[in-house]
Amino acid sequence: GKYLIGIHVKDKYSKENLDDFIYENYDVSISKAKLEKVEVSYNGNVITNGEIGAGKSYVIKGYGNSENGVLYQ
């Protein structure tokens, strides 16, 4: 997004409201997270053929990265 950053300065003993100021525009870019890998396993063995069976409990793991940390859902 776009942000306008402003700074006002004043000497400690100045009789003015404000001695000087500056405003600058900044663009803040946010990188997107990237999903690197999904892994499905059963009894500790990774499923590599893409086939799973009904009625079994599997462990599903996702691996991703991002500059700011990854949140998983």
Image (cartoon, grey):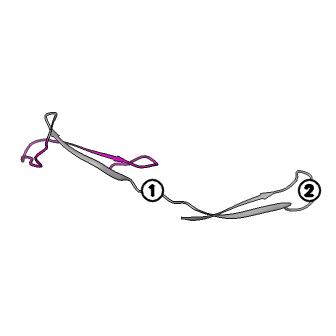
Q: Is residue 51 left or right of residue 60?
A: left
Query: What type of secondary structure mainly makes up the magenta span?
Result: loop
Determine whether 60 is above or below 17 in the image: above
Secondary element at tag 2: loop
Disc number for residue 14: 2
Q: Amino acid at mark 2?
A: Ser
Q: Residue at x 88, y 51 (%)?
A: 12
Query: What is the C-alpha distance between the residues marked 2 and 1?
Result: 44 Å
Determine whether 53 is above or below 6 in the image: above
Residue 69 lies, in percent from the top left, at 43, 46
The boundaries of the magenta stretch are 47-73
Determine whether 8 is above or below 61 in the image: below
Q: Is residue 7 magenta?
A: no
List the residue tagged with mark 1. 31
Secondary element at tag 1: loop
Residue 29 lies, in percent from the top left, at 51, 60
Q: Is residue 19 left or right of residue 48?
A: right
Give yes or no for contact between labels 2 and 1 (Cβ–Cβ under 8 Å).
no
Q: Is residue 65 magenta?
A: yes
Q: Amino acid at mark 1?
A: Ser
